Image (cartoon, helix red, strand yellow):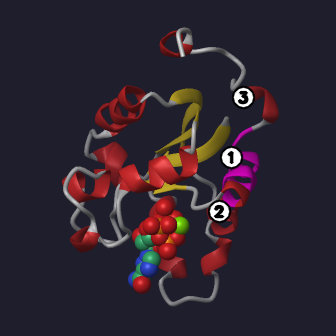
Amino acid sequence: MGLTFIAIKPDGVHRGLVGEIIARFEKRGLKLCALKVVVPEKAIAEKHYEEHAGKPFYPGLVDYLCSGPIVAMVWSGKDVVAVTRKMIGATKPAQSEPGTIRGDLALDMGRNVIHGSDSDDSAQREIKLWFKEEEVCSKYVKADRMWV
Ligand code: RTP
Ligand code: MG
């Protein structure tokens, strides 16, 4: 089973959307493997979004991620990267389909509530950046998988 890194961004935490977002992933059948609330250090936020370094929106993006607590998580499941990206919706909320997290809960691209890794390689890199190995509990079997 693959793993992915998901973060509820500061706007999502401030707006009280944490429970709703976690419930969507749980109900889909994904497995929660790690979770913490943290105000990101600038150096970590810069590394997290390093693929965008040099772009005009990069400094503002980094400042936004560091502007308050985020909920950092690791989720596991079949095709978890593709499934969670689909559930999150397009980067621009105007293009996010209704039914997706951004399509239901966001209006501004710069305040789009949630991050999700975009590939298995990004997921590995991001999980390592945000969590120690012993903080990720990926081995347990969820009750709803016992009969699969
Ligand atoms: P994320 O990494 O946060 O999950 O978002 P994403 O994959 O959907 O989009 P990505 O291209 O990785 O961009 C990261 C975040 O940067 C902001 N952005 N602004 N002004 C712009 O042109 C622009 N492009 C991207 C968005 O907040 C996006 O979520
Ligand atoms: Mg991205």
- In which quarter of the view is residue 103 placed? bottom left
Task: Say which label, 2 or 1, has the lower sequence index.
Answer: 2
Disc 2 beta carbon < 8 A from ligand 1? no
User: Percent x, y for residue 69?
Assistant: 47, 46
Classify residue 69 as left or right of residue 78. Answer: left
Label 2 and label 3: CA atoms lie apart by 18 Å
Q: Position of residue 95 (x, y in %)?
A: 26, 72
**Residue at which label 2 appears:** 48
- Tell me which residue sits at (57%, 45%) in the image: 79
Q: Secondary structure at mark 3?
A: helix
Which span of residues is magenta-colored?
122-131
Packing grade of label 2 (10 A; few <14, some 14-19, many >=20) is: some
Pick the front one: 63 or 126: 126
Q: Inspect the magenta stretch and tell me whether residue 125 lies in it.
A: yes
Locate residue 60, reporting x and y percent.
47, 77
Position of residue 36 in the picture relative to residue 138 (left or right): left
Q: Tag 2's secondary structure? A: helix
Q: Are marks 2 and 3 in contact (CB under 8 Å)?
A: no
- Residue 59 drawn at (x, y percent): 54, 79
Label 2, label 1: how far apart the Cα atoms are: 9 Å
Q: Sort mark 3 into few (<14), some (14-19) or many (20+) by Cα contacts within 10 Å.
A: few
Q: Residue furthest front?
A: 148
Q: Is residue 39 visible?
A: no
Relative height, residue 37 to residue 43 (above, below):
above
Q: Amino acid at mark 2?
A: His
As drawn, the label of residue 7 is none
Q: Which residue is mark 3?
A: 135
Check disc 1 and give the amino acid type.
Answer: Trp
Query: Mark 1 = which residue?
Result: 130
Type of amino acid under label 3: Glu
Residue at (65, 62) in percent of width and height: 48
